[in-house]
Amino acid sequence: MSTSDVEDHLPAHAPTSEGSTDAAVRIKRKRLSRGALYTRRFLRNRPAVAGLIIFAVIVIFSVLGGLPAKHSYLETDFLNLSAAPSSKHWFGTNDAGNDLYAETVHGLQRSLIIALVVSTGTTVISAVVGAAAAYFGGSLERVVLGIIHFLMVVPTFLILALFSNHSGGNWIVIAIIMLLVNWFWPARVIWTLSLSIRERDYVSASRYMGVSGLRIVVRHIIPNIGSLLIIQFTLGVVGAVMSETGLSFIGFGVKPPDVSLGALIGSGADTVSSAPWLFYFPAAALTLLTVSMALVADGLRDAFDPTSAAGGRA
């Protein structure tokens, strides 16, 4: 029943009292869906909204930014080597004559693709593995936890650098390697949360009704940690971008002729005093990307947390 429905049931000659209005507002709030509540709390967080807008602009720039470009990122201009920004080359050129604007657009696109692939895969694998280990318990739980605890003490960045060095700079191989070494941390957290969810009445009722264990995990346990998974996915994008940047910076990531933000920053760091534009433009794109996603993640955390006052009262 909405506010208008309540008012329709009041006598036409009687004014709407303050108590009736408050009751109608309470009824309207009660009908507010969970998704609408989260959205309203998120939109009241101004830094989070600003981060979302910046991220949307970055995505649009990575997809459509190459259309007005005058040169391809593979094209070389031998008459303009290490040229400063100009009307012909908006971000300047590197020492090989490649247009930095075109390289930045392509590098941003490549870094985003790697981050989204890694973050999506990590979220899905950690959710299924962590929730399944908590629900089924027994030998499966002991094996999964044994693998997780072993991987947690292994220097994963060294493993990542070792295997990435033999990938030939193929971004698909790099993304797969990053996925394989990043899933166990969130899986450990999801396992802990799923231990309490598996004891809920609706999970027990589903079990007694003969619902399969895998279906219970997918339909009942994982959806109840959906807010955590969304935040994990958002932070995973930031972590994947930083990991890819670190690998490319030290020469173990994406290699020419392909480019990424990390590769551009790594090559530009050597010429930051003589040709600073080669470093600052890719670094600015990376900073905007990571800061915007961090703001969005903070906003999502506050929106999903009922005890947080950062999102305001919905």
Image (cartoon, rainbow, N blue to C red):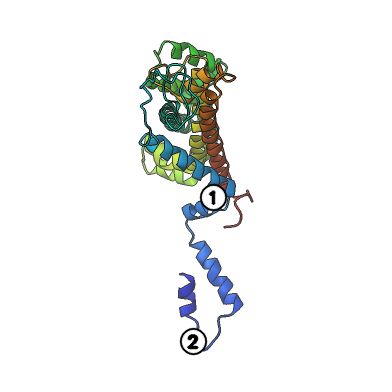
| Mark in front: 1 vs 2 | 1
Secondary structure found at label 1: helix
Foreground residue among 206 and 87: 87
Residue farthest along the bottom direction in this orientation? 13
Which numbered disc covers residue 84?
A: none
Location of residue 288 (image quadrant):
top right
Instruction: Report the quarter where the C terminus lies.
Output: bottom right
Instruction: Give how far across and how far down residue 35 sits, in percent.
Output: 47, 52
Q: Is residue 294 above or below residue 157?
A: below
Instruction: Give how far across and how far down residue 177 sits, in percent.
Output: 43, 19
Residue pointed to by mark 1: 42
* Residue 200 visible in the current orientation: no
Mark 1–mark 2 Cα distance, whole angstroms, equals 39 Å
Task: Write the residue at 56% across / 71% down.
Answer: 23
Give, as a three-letter code, the residue at label 1: Phe
Name the side, left or right, on which 217 lies relative to 186: left
Q: Dot 1: within a 10 Å radius of its alpha carbon, few (fewer than 14), some, or many (20 or more) residues?
A: many
Instruction: Report the quarter where the N terminus lies.
Output: bottom left
Number of marks present in the image shown: 2
Foreground residue among 201 and 129: 129
Instruction: Give how far across and how far down residue 21 sits, in percent.
Output: 56, 74
Give, as a three-letter code, the residue at label 2: Ala
Cβ atoms under marks 1 and 2 closer than 8 Å: no
Task: Write the residue at 49% across / 53% down.
Answer: 34
Q: Is residue 59 above or below residue 269?
A: below
Q: Is residue 24 above or below residue 171?
A: below
Residue farthest along the front direction in this orientation? 79
Secondary structure found at label 2: loop
- In primary-sequence order, the first of circles 1 and 2 is 2
Instruction: Give how far across and how far down residue 228 sits, in percent.
Output: 52, 39
Residue pointed to by mark 2: 12
* Residue 293 visible in the current orientation: yes
